[in-house]
Amino acid sequence: MIVDINKQRVTSDLVELYILIVNGTSLYFTTYHQSVQFRDYTSPYTNRTYNPIPIEFSGFEHKSDGAYARPRIVFANVLTTFKDAIGISNDGLVGAKIIRRRTLQSNLTTNPPIELPIQSFIIDRVESENALAVSFELTTAFDLAGVTIPNRIIVPNTCPWYYQGAASDRTGEKIGGCTFKEASNNAVTAYFDTKNNWLSSLGDGSFTTYAGSATKDSLYKVSATVTRNETNGTTTSQTRSLYYQALVNYSGAITASKFRLVRLYTSHSGATTYYTYADARYNDCVLYDNKIWSVTKTHSGQTPSITSGYWQRVDVCGKKLSSCAIRFRAKNNGSVVSVDLDNTKELPYGGFPAARRYGR
């Protein structure tokens, strides 16, 4: 390969491959114009598929003295491409590992892999983010400048742990101190989104059309004509409902202080068409792999995952004490998850000091 790239005329394309390791899960991207397969860098007998996304990498240099280089990597984020691919907020990537691999297109099928030296970096901070791109500043594992003690910075009223990182049903490495188990807590099955809205498997028939008066914990719906995005790129008008649960006994118009939004989900089916709407609150939601996913593009046949451009996970934590409480202290009121919390249940927040030592 060294001989090839030192020729006056290189006849094979340079292919850049990036591995982003998030919460123990590896995501594979390439700057090449199409998906490519390349052997895994730790297990050469395993092929990995790298999906194309515009990436700009700059600021790296080799030198024997002075400060370590702090490169910059920019991911295209038009139509939230990058956010949809990773499934978490950009801030949640701080501390994640990025591995950069480079090879020639002609070497993609070699065994063992033939490539330039692998480069490994840690995301140090979010440099900038907008509708077009998100930029990260990288550092090496050896560059400890700016590291503080204690290493985990405590922010008032904000949970520092990876959501479900230490749950008992988590496969692979345990990360952080959040022990909340997906879909099951104190015998209460309850899903919530970042705003603590309830995600429910109840059907439309469990909700009563709202007539101006509400009883605490009761379920209501309000119908409206909304614009639905079709599979062929056109739009149609559809009658859909928004669903609510009353937080208090109340008479008057529906407001966020008196009601919480309820989003309904069904079990995922590869044969079903799932629709998006001009108002994303109406987008279809499904249960898959013990997680709730909201459709981001009208389609059928696409399996939910954090690397899919058709789905995004919605049962994620808002990183507040209230988010922690609503999950660990959830209680049932018949078939309904009550708006009240079971305050007899322990809230294992672990903000400071931590009860146990957790590694990454």
Image (cartoon, rainbow, N blue to C red):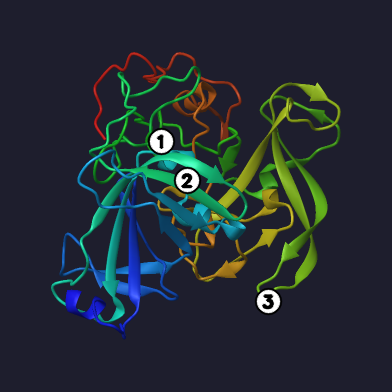
Crowd tier of the residue under label 1, counting other residues whose Cα lies within 10 Å: few below 14, some 14–19, many 20 or above: many
Q: What amino acid is at disc 1?
A: Tyr
Judge from the rendering whether residue 312 lies leftward or rightward of residue 161; answer left or right.
right
Please give the residue where the numbered disc 2 appears in the rendered image.
88
Q: Going 55% across and 70% down the picture, which residue do you hit?
A: 300
Do residues under tags 3 and 1 come within 8 Å of each other at their CB atoms? Answer: no
Which is nearer the N-term, disc 3 or disc 1? 1
Crowd tier of the residue under label 3, counting other residues whose Cα lies within 10 Å: few below 14, some 14–19, many 20 or above: few
Distance from Cα at disc 2 to Cα at disc 3? 29 Å
Do residues under tags 2 and 3 come within 8 Å of each other at their CB atoms? Answer: no
Measured from the top left, where is residue 307 in percent x and y? 43, 59
Please give the residue where the numbered disc 3 appears in the rendered image.
232
Measured from the top left, where is residue 76 in percent x and y? 53, 59
Please give the residue where the numbered disc 1 appears in the rendered image.
163
Measured from the top left, where is residue 325 in percent x and y? 49, 23
Front residue (pair 84, 141): 141
Which is nearer the N-term, disc 2 or disc 1? 2
Q: Secondary structure at mark 1?
A: loop
Q: Secondary structure at mark 3?
A: loop
Q: What amino acid is at disc 3?
A: Asn
Front residue (pair 315, 116): 116
User: Which quarter of the image is occupied by the N terminus?
Assistant: bottom left
Q: Going 58% across and 32% down the picture, which residue do you hit?
A: 196
Q: Which mark is residue 51?
A: none
